[in-house]
Image (cartoon, rainbow, N blue to C red):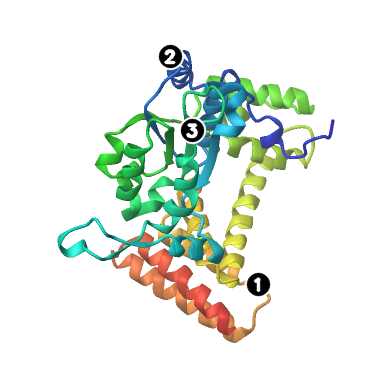
Amino acid sequence: MTEIPIWRIKYLPKDLNEVCGRDEIKRRLKQLVEEKNFPHLLFVGPEGIGKTTIARLFAKEFLGSFYTANSKVVYANVPLTSEEMKLASSEAYVSTSKVGSLAGKKITTPAFIAVKIKPFVQLKVLGDAPFKILIVKHFDSLENNQQAFRRLMEIYGRNCRMILITTKISKIIDPIMSRCQIFLLYPTEIEAFKELILEICKNEGLKIEDNILQTLYKVTEGVISHAIDLLQLVAISGDIITLDNLYERLISSQKELLRSLLLICFKGDFIKARELSRNIQSKYKYNAQELFNLLLIELKKFPLSKYAKIKLMNLIADADFRATDGLDTDIQISNLLAKICHLSEAL
């Protein structure tokens, strides 16, 4: 068997029983499996908390041997390719049944729904499964297209159940929430967290004290995936986990993420840059000023011309001033990233 180098993947739970903590969530999901039926579900929780992993394990347990043929995961925040956009456009049609202002108008289904959702939910169930299961990550990214998605939930609900995943319940429209059973996922309880980390340390030949376990829980806010990633990074320094090398690796990983953010901006990929910046803010609780200051520090390390550095520093300073002035910080950060992406084309 090939050794899996990434611990987060190596120690990924294989079924619901192996999920760390969250006993009440597991109990509710197992009850749905026993009942062999469930409504559409909405999983809500912080980034990296395990929403998608739990959704997959639930779908696998519910569908059994028919899981592969009747399940699918789609990412609502991933832009469509040019080929997919052409396909969506080609499926538009002229209405012959509408009356009034819509009569004779060209009817188009939102591209993401037309290409990623409809082909799967329209196909009949294979085998003896009661229905198909579609998992939609970053569902809030659909924004105004949620109404069109709601119609699909109603039309194809008997053939396919949806598990919608989001970090922002405030961005989900009421008609969607009213059609879903909501699961709020919180960080793992500290005792379950400690038990899993100790098991990993034992398997990997590491030594860790209880006070360091508590520190690891605090700095990762109980998010298992973040804790395992950090633990593996610290283990590079030796088999004894200390507070010094824990904090050293934590700071190092933060710097690597900020450097990656700038590199993505320099490649002109605004969508990925905005997503990463929001993940960084959520994970490390930076406010706008702190993020701008850290970006400035990392920017100085890049081998750029003096002219380029001055231009970029001016952009950061301007965004910092606007954020200090009380304007929407998320808009200011996104605006800064967009300007860096645009400027990178001229550098």
Name the image quarter holding the C terminus: bottom right
Question: Which residue is at the front of the view, 57 or 160?
Answer: 160
Count neighbours of disc 1 (C-alpha within 10 A) and say few if under 14, some if 14 to 19, many if 20 or more: few
Dividing the picture into quarters, in which one does residue 241 lie? top right
With 294 as the anchor, is 302 left or right in this view? right
- Total label count? 3
Where does residue 72 sit, x and y in percent of width and height? 54, 39
Say if mark 2 contacts mark 3, CB within 8 Å.
Answer: no
What residue lies at 46% left-to-right and 42% top-to-bottom? Answer: 136
| Residue labelled with disc 1 | 302
| Residue labelled with disc 3 | 133
Count neighbours of disc 2 (C-alpha within 10 A) and say few if under 14, some if 14 to 19, many if 20 or more: few
Question: Which residue is at the front of the view, 236 or 56?
Answer: 56
Where does residue 65 sit, x and y in percent of width and height? 62, 23
For the residues labelled 2 and 3, the Cα–Cα distance comes to 16 Å
What residue lies at 67% left-to-right and 23% top-to-bottom? Answer: 198
Q: Which mark's residue is nearer the viewer, 3 or 1?
A: 3
Looking at the rendered structure, the secondary structure element under dot 2 is helix
Question: Which residue is at the front of the view, 268 or 82?
Answer: 82
Residue 302 visible, this orientation: yes
User: In the rendering, which numbered label is found on residue 35?
Assistant: 2
Dividing the picture into quarters, in which one does residue 328 lie? bottom left
User: In the rendering, which numbered label is found on residue 6?
Assistant: none
Looking at the rendered structure, the secondary structure element under dot 3 is strand
For the residues labelled 1 and 2, the Cα–Cα distance comes to 57 Å
Say if mark 3 contacts mark 1, CB within 8 Å.
Answer: no
Q: Which mark's residue is nearer the viewer, 1 or 2?
A: 2
Mark 2 belongs to which amino acid? Glu
